[in-house]
Amino acid sequence: MTSSNAINFRDFIRDIPDYPKPGITFKDITPLLADGDAFGACVSALACHMPSDASLIVGVESRGFLFGAALAQLTGLGFVPVRKPGKLPADVHAIEYELEYGMDRLEIHRDALAHGQKVVIVDDLLATGGTAKATLELINQLGADVVACLFVIELAFLDGRAQLGDTPVHHLLSY
């Protein structure tokens, strides 16, 4: 695998104009995922921001699964998915949250986290912060503590990190 210092991750992010709706420029990570060296270097770069007291990684559906599971494997930590409604088979704890165009809901298995457990939230993108904030609140409601949030991309102009209070937030790319 190539060192993450030798790879410019920005070269692997494709802009898709007017997706999913007019006026939005979507940051497409599929070229990054398709390149083994770039993807591996990206996961290694995320690992550099892992707090030493973290015991579990929580990935947010759906692209957070890709980076979170790979990061869990690399660091030897477990992985817990936070999913959209109706996707988890056991008893769930859920949270509803507001989007700019309506409401959404996230779920986690009720027994996925232990009280006081130190977890890291991983997702591909931090935009307005609504999904990340809902995930953080969901984890806190189960009694676990979020010790960091890791993102491949942060759309800094949307100020999503303000939604996460004083939780440490790290990104690899900022737009």
Image: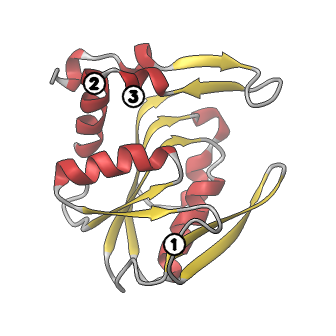
Residue shown at 62% from the left, 43% from the top: 159
Q: Which residue is mark 3?
A: 33
Residue 132 occupies which quadrant of the picture?
A: bottom right
Residue 145 visible, this angle: yes
- Disc 1 marks which amino acid? Ile
Image coordinates for residue 125, horizontal then vertical, percent: 53, 40
Secondary element at image label 3: helix
- Disc 3 marks which amino acid? Leu
Viewport quadrant of the N terminus: top left
Of 81 and 127, the residue lying toward us: 81
Q: CA distance from mark 3 to mark 1?
A: 25 Å
Mark closer to the chain start, 1 or 2: 2
Of 29 and 126, the residue lying toward us: 29
Mark closer to the chain start, 3 or 1: 3
Position of residue 133 relative to residue 116, above or below, is: above
Residue shown at 61% from the left, 47% from the top: 160
Q: CA distance from mark 2 to mark 3?
A: 7 Å
Image coordinates for residue 87, horizontal then vertical, percent: 57, 65
- The total of numbered circles placed on residues is 3
Secondary element at image label 2: helix
Q: CA distance from mark 1 to mark 2?
A: 30 Å
Cβ atoms at labels 3 and 1 below 8 Å apart: no
Image coordinates for residue 120, horizontal then vertical, percent: 36, 60
Q: Which residue is mark 2?
A: 36
- For label 2, count other residues whose C-alpha is less than 10 Å away and answer few (under 14), some (14-19) or many (20+): few
Residue shown at 25% from the left, 31% from the top: 40
- Disc 2 marks which amino acid? Gly
Q: Which residue is mark 1?
A: 108
